[in-house]
């Protein structure tokens, strides 16, 4: 009886291992070299410029004589493509600069594995210097919003206005977290995910940050999937989650003295709208605009509705 039970357990173990191996085989997705991705995802006006030894994916659009360019910073696991709707609406009158942050998009990882907020602040100031921008309007979504206001704290003379879109900064408790983010924070499992990428997981992660999941198209998932597969990005994401600020710098927000527009999707399940209220409370004279139907990336989910508010703020 004991031998029969042992034999049955062995068969079950082999079956589970076979299923596991099949799952890996079906979802096998190794990194892709950046040169393989450029043709589709970095057509003109994309360019790659050297910033601190890193080849940074940048788009610099609109009139060069704009005295106060608009510089927009994307969030975690996103890319400059998230701002395309805003850029299309604004570039006729404004110079607009977008970029892929180190560790994300086509820029990819840095050699130091440093994705701390301090490193991102240095990166943004170096990028502005490289592009000859002495002062700008600085905007950002999620992580990008956190970087934007921290740059304004660190170098107030460089920032004329702020636009914060579902921005990080305060401690928060998510109502829901994209499954890709959860896996990236799990030691061991995140290493496995450096070689596999189930399409269903990617789609669920994108749908999670939208207020209306029906807006998530296959083409949108294609883009997020391609940016994730860029060589080194999955490993960098795990490193980034080990270097989060966690609200430790939130006390600095009250020192901001710059005209600030705050946009928030009320269906944001990652950073709740209550954090937008905190920004409005702590930044004197700031304005909060809430979008009842939108989620964590409102600038991407409904560019027309959100950029209309931005146009008023800029003008």
Image (cartoon, rainbow, N blue to C red):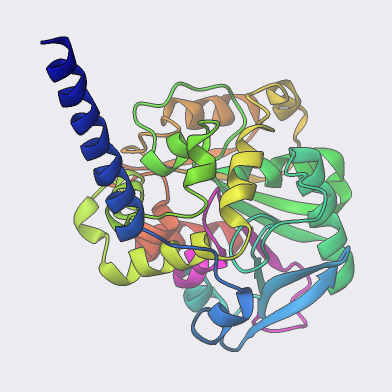
At x 56% / y 52%, what residue is drawn? 234
At x 18% / y 16%, what residue is drawn? 3
Q: Position of residue 60 (x, y in %)?
A: 68, 78
Residue 117 seen = yes
In the image, is residue 77 part of the stretch drawn in magenta? Answer: yes
Image quarter of residue 114 = top right
The residue at the far top in this view is: 2
Residue 144 seen = no
At x 32% / y 72%, what residue is drawn? 219
Relative to 258, is 174 above or below? above
Q: Position of residue 217 (x, y in %)?
A: 26, 66
Quadrant into which the C terminus falls: bottom right
Image quarter of residue 58 = bottom right
Say which of 217 and 4 sits in front.
4
Quadrant into which the N terminus falls: top left
Q: Position of residue 313 (x, y in %)?
A: 56, 56
Relative to 61, is 293 above or below? above
Image quarter of residue 20 = top left
In the image, is residue 195 part of the stretch drawn in magenta? Answer: no
> For the image shown, how many numbered marks are present on the structure?
0
Relative to 190, is 233 above or below? below
At x 40% / y 52%, what residue is drawn? 298
Say which of 212 and 9 sits in front.
9
Q: Position of residue 120 (x, y in %)?
A: 76, 48
Region of the chain picked out in magenta, as a range? 61-85
Report whether 110 appears left or right of 168.
right
């Amino acid at each position: 009886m004991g031998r029969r039970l042992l034999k049955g357990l062995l068969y079950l173990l082999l079956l589970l291992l076979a299923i596991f191996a099949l799952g890996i085989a079906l979802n096998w997705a190794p990194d892709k070299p950046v040169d393989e991705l450029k043709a589709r995802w970095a057509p003109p006006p994309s360019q790659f410029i050297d910033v601190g030894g890193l080849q940074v994916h940048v788009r610099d659009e609109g009139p060069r004589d704009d005295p106060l360019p608009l510089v927009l910073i994307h969030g975690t696991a996103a890319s400059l493509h998230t701002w395309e709707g805003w850029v299309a609406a604004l570039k006729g009158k404004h110079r607009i600069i977008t970029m892929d942050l180190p560790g994300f998009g086509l820029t990819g990882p840095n050699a130091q594995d440093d994705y701390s907020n301090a490193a991102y602040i240095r990166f943004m100031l170096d990028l502005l210097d490289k592009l000859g921008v002495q002062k700008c309007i600085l905007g950002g979504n999620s992580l990008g919003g956190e970087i934007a206001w921290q740059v304004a704290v660190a170098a107030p003379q460089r920032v004329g206005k702020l636009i914060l879109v579902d921005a990080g900064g305060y401690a928060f408790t998510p109502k829901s977290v994209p499954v890709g983010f959860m896996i990236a924070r799990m030691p061991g499992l995140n290493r496995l995910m450096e070689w596999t990428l189930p399409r269903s997981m990617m789609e669920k992660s994108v749908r999670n940050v939208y207020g209306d999941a029906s807006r998530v198209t296959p083409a949108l998932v294609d883009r997020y999937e391609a940016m994730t597969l860029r060589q080194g990005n999955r490993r960098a994401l795990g490193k980034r989650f080990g270097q989060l600020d966690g609200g430790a710098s939130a006390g600095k927000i009250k020192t901001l003295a710059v005209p600030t527009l705050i946009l928030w999707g009320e269906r944001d399940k990652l950073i709740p709208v209550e954090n937008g209220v905190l920004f409005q409370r702590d930044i004197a004279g700031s304005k909060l605009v809430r979008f009842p139907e939108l989620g964590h990336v409102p600038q991407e989910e409904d560019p027309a509705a959100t950029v209309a508010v931005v146009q008023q703020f800029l003008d």
